[in-house]
Structures are given as C-alpha cells and as structure tokens.
Image (cartoon, rainbow, N blue to C red):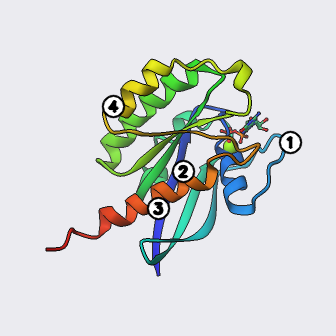
Amino acid sequence: MIQKKVCMIGAFAVGKTSLVRRYVSGIYSQRYLSTVGVKIDRRVIATLGEEITVMLWDLAGEDEFHSLRTSYLRGAAGYVLVVDGTRPRSFDTALRLQRIAETALGDIPFVLALNKHDLAESWRLEEAAVEELRATGWHTMPCSAKTGEAVDALFADLARRMLEAEVPPRG
Ligand code: GDP
Ligand code: MG
C-alpha cells in the first residue's frame, strides 16, 4: 500500500480544514472548525492503476507560521496551498509560504487551491497574477469546500503527480 503525506498550507481561515472535511467526508460545515494541534485524515484514491492512501495533515488555529515548521512538513510528498479568493492578502501569504515549503521539501507536487469560488460576487483575485503562475507550470484550481466544486479534482491531480514523481520513467 502506497501512502503519501500531504500538508495543507495557507493563511488563517482560507478553508484548509473545510477542504479536508469535504474531501474526506463529503460534508461542509458552516461552523468554525477549530482543531488543536495536527489533525490527520486519510482517503484512499485510485490513480494510474494504483491505490494510494493520502494522509492529509491539517493544523489548527494560528497555523500560518506553524505550517512552516519542519516537524509539520517533514516527509510530505505534496501539499495543497490554499487561498481565499475573496482575500487577496491570502494569495500573497500563499506565495510566501510556498517559497518556504519549497526550501524545506524541494520541488515536490503541489496545487494552488483558489477556494470559496462559490462567493463569485466577492472574488478579488487578479486573474493576471494567477495566469502568470499557471504559465510557470503551477497547477491552480478554483474550488469550493462549500459546494464541493473541484475538490475531488484537485486532490486527484495531486495524487497522480505524487505517484508520477515516485515512479521513474520507463524505457
Ligand atoms: P482554515 O483556517 O484554513 O482551516 O479555514 P476553515 O476551513 O476553518 O474555514 C474558515 C471559514 O471559511 C469557515 O467559516 C468556513 O465555513 C468558511 N469556508 C471554508 N471554505 C469555504 C468555501 O468554499 N466557501 C465559503 N463560502 N466559505 C468557506
Ligand atoms: Mg483549520
């Protein structure tokens, strides 16, 4: 059984815990989900003819800085960088956290999750800035923990790339 650790990374209240809950349990709770310490959820996903157990690491509270700790990141095969599309500052925070994660973990797969896409009328992200990242090869995905939009898709994309990163090309 292949197991992969995935860290949820992003500013406070962008929807990291909600995305994990949606992905793992298929539910969304309006209630504020304050957890203590690290919470690890898992879901088995089939990709490229293999079954992978994705271990989702999520932090509680003022996690923006804790998420940079080596003890949190150690051993991760991928990460989800979460932005709240209604809060442009959370985009800047994500870029900063990504650089730190890359320094700690190297060039491993990650997805930039542009969450709260259900709040389209309050969307405040600059399309050009997102496009720029896509042009450099970033996988970015508008999604919503509330409606479930693209939540499975973003974890599936990550799982496939984590597996590809593990298997050396044949031939
Ligand atoms: P975390 O601090 O990053 O773990 O964020 P939470 O998952 O605790 O979510 C913070 C707040 O944003 C909560 O009030 C959630 O209900 C809300 N939230 C999370 N995801 C979404 C979403 O996709 N759409 C909307 N409208 N609200 C969301
Ligand atoms: Mg949380």
- Point out residue 44 in the picture as x, y percentages from the top left corner: 58, 72
Which mark is on residue 154? Answer: 2
Q: Amino acid at mark 3?
A: Ala
Q: Residue at x 85, y 41 (%)?
A: 30
Above or below — where is 79 with respect to 96? below
Label 1 environment density (alpha carbons within 10 Å; few <14, some 14–19, many ≥20): few
- Point out residue 156 in the picture as x, y percentages from the top left corner: 52, 59
Left or right: 97, with 149 as reference point: left
Residue, disc 4 = 135
Label 3 environment density (alpha carbons within 10 Å; few <14, some 14–19, many ≥20): many
Tag 1–tag 4 contact (CB < 8 Å): no
Which numbered disc, 1 or 4, marks the residue closer to the eye?
A: 4
Q: Determine the CA span between mark 2 and mark 4.
A: 18 Å
Residue, disc 1 = 31
Q: Residue at x 71, y 19 (%)?
A: 122
Q: Earlier in the sequence, mark 2 or mark 4?
A: 4
